[in-house]
Amino acid sequence: MHLARDLNGFRVSADSYVEAGRGGSFVGRLALEFLRDDIERLQKYFRLVFFEGICARDILGEIGVKPIMSIYVQTIATSGLWHFQFHLEDFMNGAENREEEPSRSDYEYHARVRPYENADVTYVRVAD
């Protein structure tokens, strides 16, 4: 997906700010001060700054950035099934254990924030 490039914007990925050796949740492992500074600088040069990553709303909230729009990228199988939904339901019912990060943070975030239901736009990507 090249949305940022196509709209003359800039894409920032949460994964680029993970600090090696840091424990805790996914959000807690990020160099948030650097992320905030980078987004502030980029906003001076680009009309649109796209932020991507798991726990996006939590991360932006931590650094005081209010998004103007949210896009949820939903990956479905060629059969039309959204397999993540089944894993999320199992996680929420205690039938599936997610101890490893960033998977645990991702599932907790989806259960709490439900970004797939609250996005302004949902982009459906078909992949197996």
Image (spheres, rainbow, N blue to C red):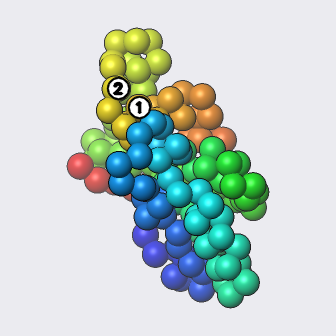
Q: Residue at x 68, y 48 (%)?
A: 62
In the rendered structure, find residue 104 and report the number of the disc placed on it: 1
Q: Residue at x 58, y 66 (%)?
A: 34
- Mark sitting earlier along the chain (2/1): 2
Residue 96: image quadrant is top left
Q: Residue 36 in the image: x percent, y percent?
A: 65, 64
- Mark 2 lies on a secondary structure that is loop
Left or right: residue 26 versus residue 87 is: right
Q: Which amino acid type is marked by label 2?
A: Arg
Q: Residue at x 50, y 29 (%)?
A: 108
* Closest to the observer, 58 or 29: 29
- Mark 1 lies on a secondary structure that is helix
Q: Residue 105 in the image: x percent, y percent?
A: 46, 35
Q: Which amino acid type is marked by label 1?
A: Arg
- Residue 85 visible in image: no
Q: Quadrant of the N terminus?
A: bottom left
In the rendered structure, find residue 98 and report the number of the disc placed on it: 2
* Closest to the observer, 117 or 58: 58
Pointers 2 and 1 in contact (C-beta within 8 Å):
yes
Task: Kindly give the residue lying farthest to the top in the view shown.
Answer: 94
Residue 89, relative to residue 29: is it above or below? above
- Residue 55 visible in image: yes
Q: Residue at x 54, y 35 (%)?
A: 109
Residue 59, relative to residue 2: is it above or below? above
Residue 85, relative to residue 66: is it above or below? above
Task: Kindly give the residue lying farthest to the front in the view shown.
Answer: 21
Q: Residues within 10 Å of mark 2 (few under 14, many from 20)?
A: some
- The span from disc 2 to disc 1 (Cα, nearest Å) is 5 Å
Residue 93: image quadrant is top left
Q: Residue 15 in the image: x percent, y percent?
A: 43, 58
Q: Residues within 10 Å of mark 1 (few under 14, many from 20)?
A: some
In the rendered structure, find residue 18 and report the number of the disc placed on it: none
